[in-house]
Amino acid sequence: MNLKHLARRTITLATVAAAALVGGAAGGIALADQQADQRATTTMSGGGIVAHRVATSDQIYDTTAPNIWQTLPGSTLSYAVPSNTTRLVTAEFTAEANGRDGTGGCAVRVVTRKAGSTTLTELHPRSGVDFIWALEQDGSAAHAMSRSLTVASGTRSFIVQVQASTADTLVCRLDDWHFQIDVHTSS
């Protein structure tokens, strides 16, 4: 390879690298991201914690309702976001869980509802039944999840829901659970 050809190759590689850097700064490097995963990434930020709410129970909860979200009794936590502000809410849920007597999985999610509305909004990541909490063959084990959402002013309820993600005879069981939300100032 002669020096002139090597110089051209170096300039071409430098041009490609510069284009990737500019593309990354302007709008994200899309090549690897698009090929690796088409799901969206959501980022949020908040400041200090202004409220902390907790609900916990050692009572067993079973549901067999296939493909219907059921509210975990006692898991509703509320917070009033002041007028003309937003708040980042982070939620954590832990429980002993299992799926029994069937096939498929038990899905869990955290949703919010603004006072006076019937519309439920799932906290991020919004996985729905894609977030399998427990499978029939797993036996009882401890499970944990974290979720988050930035919300506008108004009183909001935050709720844990569970469903048997199958039409079979699966029993989804939760026991010894702990649900908490932290409300952060706007950043």
Image (cartoon, rainbow, N blue to C red):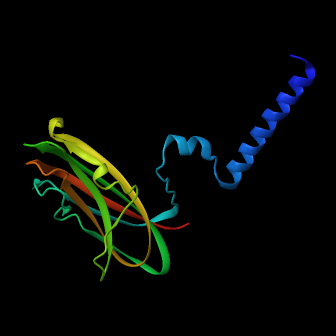
Looking at the image, which is closer to me, 3 or 104?
3
In this orientation, which residue lies closer to the viewer: 178 or 4? Answer: 4
- Residue, x 78% and y 42% (percent of image)? 18
Q: Image height check: is 35 above or below 130?
A: above
Residue 7: which quarter of the image?
A: top right
Q: Give the residue displayed 86% in from the left and 23% down from the top.
A: 6
Foreground residue among 38 and 156: 38
The residue at 64%/46% (across/down) is: 29
Q: Is residue 158 above or below residue 173?
A: below
Residue 182 picture location, percent across and down: 39, 62
> Is 23 displayed left or right of 61 in the figure?
right
Outermost residue on the right side: it is 4
* 163 relative to 140, above or below: below
Q: Position of residue 8 (x, y in %)?
A: 87, 30
Image point (26%, 46%), residue name: 132
Q: Is residue 5 left or right of residue 87?
A: right
Residue 149 image offset from top left, x and y in percent = 42, 63
Question: What percent of the width, then of the height, locates residue 63?
Answer: 11, 56
| Quadrant the N terminus occupies | top right
The image quarter in which residue 152 lies:
bottom left
